[in-house]
Amino acid sequence: MTDKEYLVALYAFTGFGPIRIRLLLNYFKSAKRVWELELDEILKVGLHKNIAEKFTIHRNNFDFTKYFQRLEKLGIKYTTNADREYPKNLRDLEDAPVVIYYMGVLSNKDESAVAIVGSRKMTPYGKEIAEKFSRELGKHGITIVSGLARGVDTVVHRGALSVGGRTIAVIASGLDRIYPPENTKLVYEIIRMGGAVMSEYPLGYPPLPSNFPLRNRIVSGISKAILVVEGLERSGTLITASHAAEQGRSVFAVPGRITSPTSGAPHFLLQNGAKLALSPKDILDELSLEIKVDNDEETSLENINKHSKS
């Protein structure tokens, strides 16, 4: 087994999480070494006995050959944060997934991706706005990211596809357990059109309620900006926007009717510093500015390196 395969097996134990995995790797230097730790060694590094015992059970039951053969059979690829193809926008986040499973294609174009999120119980207005923004941004070559959920997420994936655009769906379960199941056909349409469907969860992992807030940090983290269309003031939509703000992403919101409960999230965000989006051009203008700044910084670093070598 390669160390990368040991890392995949380690991360398949969801009791650790990305931050703890990194701490273990920094201390023990290799995934293989961590995988082979005795119970008393695991306890010495401060892990709770209950977690340590669950890990030993996971290790004893994990069949490397069957697991990786199943990935190959299902057409599921994987990448780690040490690989070149790992999404650049995620790489430097403190709680970025150590392993990402994906179907389809990862692309450098995703560096300027925009996440569009909103209510599962969208209004006709929310549907109209979600379609408008996803189609227009998709026409301009912007990768559209969302969570494959019912409602706004589904609409924006379909909106991007309708104009031949690229879209990424980040799900909260193993890629062999698509949720919601009625979007299975949409998943394969995304893949067929050159997009990607991804997850940090191992094969067989169910869509538990606790997975969705964690999934949302990937939706925002893989994107350059996030647009909130609709959502209740206390909702997963607002959690995604909070992740985006913490990650230093640009947060946009579309205003709605003041009498509509689904306007709660975007109006709360607008009152607390989010950028007003009245048309897709507002986001395109912002992205062009940020991309220009990034390019200028890279050019400056190259010049500094050239001068230091001369």
Image (cartoon, rainbow, N blue to C red):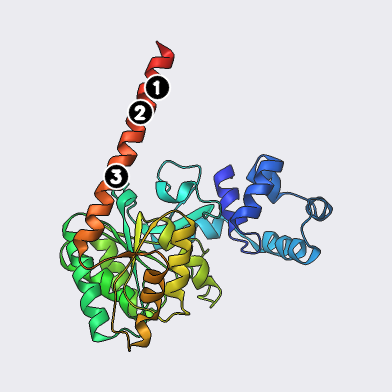
Residue 76 seen in the current view: no
Asked whether 299 or 16 is in front, the reply is 299
Asked whether 67 or 38 is in front, the reply is 38
Hey, what amino acid is under mark 1?
A: Ile
Residue 212, image x, y percentages: 49, 72
In the depicted structure, whether residue 305 falls above or below residue 137: above
Q: Residue 304 got which mark?
A: 1
**Labels 2 and 3: the sequence-earlier one:** 3
Residue 121, image x, y percentages: 35, 85
The quarter of the displayed image where residue 140 is located: bottom left
Q: Is residue 8 left or right of residue 217?
A: right
Q: Is residue 9 left or right of residue 123?
A: right
Classify 10 Å Cα crowding around label 2: few (below 14), some (14-19), many (20 and above). few
Q: Residue at x 35, y 33 (%)?
A: 298
Mark 3 and mark 1 residues within 8 Å of each other at the beta carbon: no
Asked whether 268 or 169 is in front, the reply is 268
Mark 1 and mark 2 residues within 8 Å of each other at the beta carbon: yes
Instruction: Give the residue at mark 2.
Output: 300
Hey, what amino acid is under mark 2?
A: Ser
Instruction: Give the residue at mark 3.
Output: 291
Q: Secondary structure at mark 1?
A: helix
**Alpha carbon distance from label 2 to label 3:** 14 Å
Q: Residue at x 19, y 71 (%)?
A: 132
**Alpha carbon distance from label 1 to label 2:** 6 Å
What quarter of the picture does the C terminus occupy? top left
The quarter of the displayed image where residue 15 is located: bottom right
Hey, what amino acid is under mark 3?
A: Ile
Q: Residue at x 32, y 89 (%)?
A: 259
Q: Secondary structure at mark 3?
A: helix
Residue 287, image x, y percentages: 27, 51
What quarter of the picture does the N terminus occupy? top right
